[in-house]
Amino acid sequence: MNRFRPRRTRHRKHRRAAAAWLLGVALVAGAIGYPPPAGADELDRSQPSKSYDEFIDAVWAYESDIDPSEQSYYNDNWDNPVESYPEVEYPGRVIRDDNGDPVEATGLTIEEFFKIIGIGHLYSPADPSPDWRLIQSNVINYLGFVGFQFQESDLVDLGYYEFETTTEMQITYPIHYVDVPNSHWAHGVREFVAYPPIVDRSTIVRDVVVFADDFFTGKNGINNYADFTTPDKHILVIKDHFENKYQGIVS
């Protein structure tokens, strides 16, 4: 999954360490009834152990970039210019320059930042107990990744979604986001036909993720986008995602 982290004036977030990620996979393995992957026993366990649900909460906060422990920061900077993030036409639709690079917006307040990522209507500094999982499930980054930062291909792999397609000259092409160099999007290009190795078929590559109701499969009662961004449904996709990743490691 391809993500962009907002750059706060107070700090910069870093990607998780490989060892911590492997420990998380070990937690997943135990939760779903499988032995841990090789190397998990040698990990540094000096930190207090976490349950599977605690691990999910921690990684969900990381992936969505909405952390309940930072509520004071959000409230204190609701009207202060502390964030930078790519500009969007609307949540999930990045604005690019002539070179195809995202146009950076600086000096954003938390209120402005939350509106950009589609959660402005779900959070208020006056609310002492926000519904964090609802907020995290509805985050849309500048490229259209949703919630736990899923793209179309993630949900297709897990059986929750089917690619949108189009047929031209008797050839049917799937249409979806693929991570390619920004130069492909120079001069306003938003789609092009390619044969990405990761997809292994001719594809109409789109520059952002787009989820449409008609292409949800109904797995686990997720029939549309609204279902997908409901916390008790979104968590099912997250857990399926981790089980899928675990199986990929041990198989």
Image: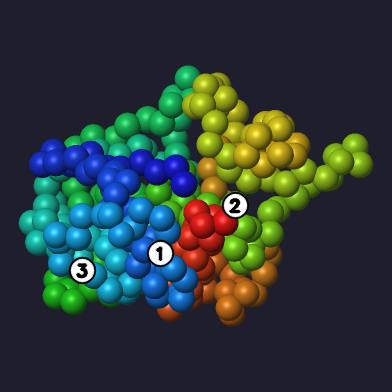
Query: Where's residue 135, x and y in %?
Result: 33, 66
The residue that disc 1 covers is 36
Q: Residue at x 75, y 39 (%)?
A: 201
Classify mark 1: helix, strand or loop. loop
Nearer the observer, 63 or 109: 63
Tag in front: 1 or 2: 1
Verify CB contact (< 8 Å) between mark 3 and mark 1. Answer: no
For label 1, the crowd category at 10 Å Cα-Cα, with few meaning under 14, some 14 to 19 and many 20 or more, is some
Return the disc, 3 or 2, that comes first in the chain's sequence: 3
Instruction: Decide if residue 63 is on the left or right side of residue 245.
Output: left
Q: CA distance from mark 3 to mark 2?
A: 32 Å
Q: Residue at x 55, y 67 (%)?
A: 225
The residue that disc 2 covers is 153
Nearer the observer, 119 or 160: 160
Q: CA distance from mark 3 to mark 1?
A: 15 Å
Tag in front: 3 or 2: 3
Instruction: Decide if residue 74 is on the left or right side of residue 40.
Output: left
Residue type marked 3: Ser
Return the disc, 1 or 2, that comes first in the chain's sequence: 1
